[in-house]
Amino acid sequence: MDAHLVDFLSLLVRWLHVIAGIAWIGSSFYFIWLDNSLEPPPPGSEAAKKGVAGELWAVHGGGFYNPQKYAGAPPSLPDRLHWFKWEAYTTWLSGTALLAVVYWLHAGTMMLDPTRAVLSAAAAVGIGIASMVGSWVVYDGLCRSPLGRRDEVLGLVVFGLLTLLAWGLQHAFNGRAAFIHIGTAIGTIMTANVFFVIIPGQKRMVAAMRSGERPDPADGRRGKQRSVHNNYFTLPVVFLMISNHYASTYSHRHAWVVLALISAAGVAIRHFFNRRHKGEFAWPYPAVGAVLLAGTAWWTTPRIPPLPKLEGEATFDRVRAIVGQRCLACHSRVPTFPGVPQPPGGVILESADGITQNAQRIYNQVVATRVMPLGNVTQMTDQERAVLSAWIMSGAKR
């Protein structure tokens, strides 16, 4: 019952995380689009006299909208201002809670891979937390340094450092845990941008206006820079959040390079939309993204590692014995493996039908990518993988 409650809790937290993430990403995409689509009002118009730097007209849901952006600050502030912050905070809090429930509480199986590094569960969790906090400290320091005034160079440096972090985590954790912790590191940077830079700057601007002073334009510039950074982080971090479903990416020998290529494609595609919203020619960018993704798809095609020569026949009885010893602890109706309340992916291998019906999935996960058993916690041997491979390749017959 306790394991089921933990599993149901992770469902609720994951649901909340997705809902909050949709709200945050939606507002980020909308405001970057809005900022890039504004047009200056005609000289001498009422809007220009009020200090409006840009405006647009839009229609949606049967109504007309006329958003306006002021060059500095409006002549007066309304009593009620809408702030956009809780979407970011809720996304990070729910994501971190989900990380703790799914990965940190079961670090021994969900994070460790003895073939990569010999770590204790506590050390793995510590590295995970350090990757989140350290990423923000380094990133924020770079933004506040003279490099922060050169956006293109800063972007390349940050991209390179995150790729270096991916390389390091790949040598510490299993592939799924490495990717998810890169995602939480970027998510921490994005949320910290809102909490430590964007919202405090906006509060100082509002306080200055209410006291009759002119807001510091530096707060606006810093907030805009961090908001744009968050916009470009979005597509890579969304990929990282769903990556655990795609073993060909995180199980690759050079998974950190795979991540860099897919992230670069995401940045290029996001840049296309940002440029197009300004009315600029931007078609080379999605072309670059498509080439990167196509190349990555080819590169990550599973190439089965050499297996030892098969000893004996690959009979179904032999296959069933291997599955029973190495897989059933998790893939049974009532799993006996600690922390696994339900069979992962709904795959049940207790019966002959269950094994034959999932033969292709077994081949992909156990033979081709070798991501299962997770972290090889049940110590499946290469000879056993060879038996499974031979049986499946011969038709998976009983």
Image (cartoon, rainbow, N blue to C red):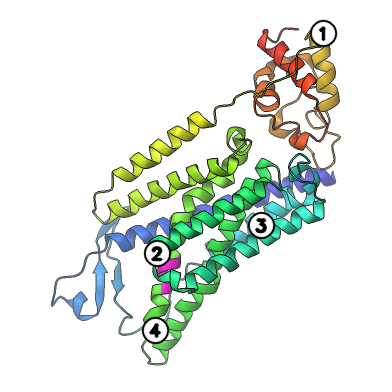
Q: Quadrant of residue 360?
A: top right
Magenta segment boundaries in residue numbering? 222-226
Disc nearer the start of the sequence (2/4): 2
Badge 1 marks a residue whose secondary structure is: loop
- Whole-number angstrom distance, CA of label 3 to CA of label 1: 49 Å
Judge depth for marks 4 and 1 and give the one in front.
Answer: 1
Q: Which residue is mark 3?
A: 96
Marker disc for residue 151:
2
Determine the image quadrant of residue 34. Answer: bottom left
**How many labels sit on residues?**
4
Q: Kindly report which numbered mark, 2 or 4, lies closer to the viewer in this rendering.
A: 2
Q: Earlier in the sequence, mark 3 or mark 4?
A: 3
- The local crowd at label 4, few if under 14, some if 14 to 19, many if 20 or more residues have their Cα within 10 Å, is few
Kind of element beneath mark 2: helix
Q: Secondary structure at mark 3?
A: helix
Using the image, tell me which numbered label, if any, was put on residue 312: 1
* Res. 82 in view: no
C-alpha separation, residue under disc 2 versus residue under disc 1: 62 Å
User: Looking at the picture, does residue 59 appear above or below residue 303?
Assistant: below
Q: Is residue 259 left or right of residue 282?
A: right
Specify which label sits upstream in the sequence, 4 or 1. Answer: 4
**What residue is pinned by disc 4?**
216
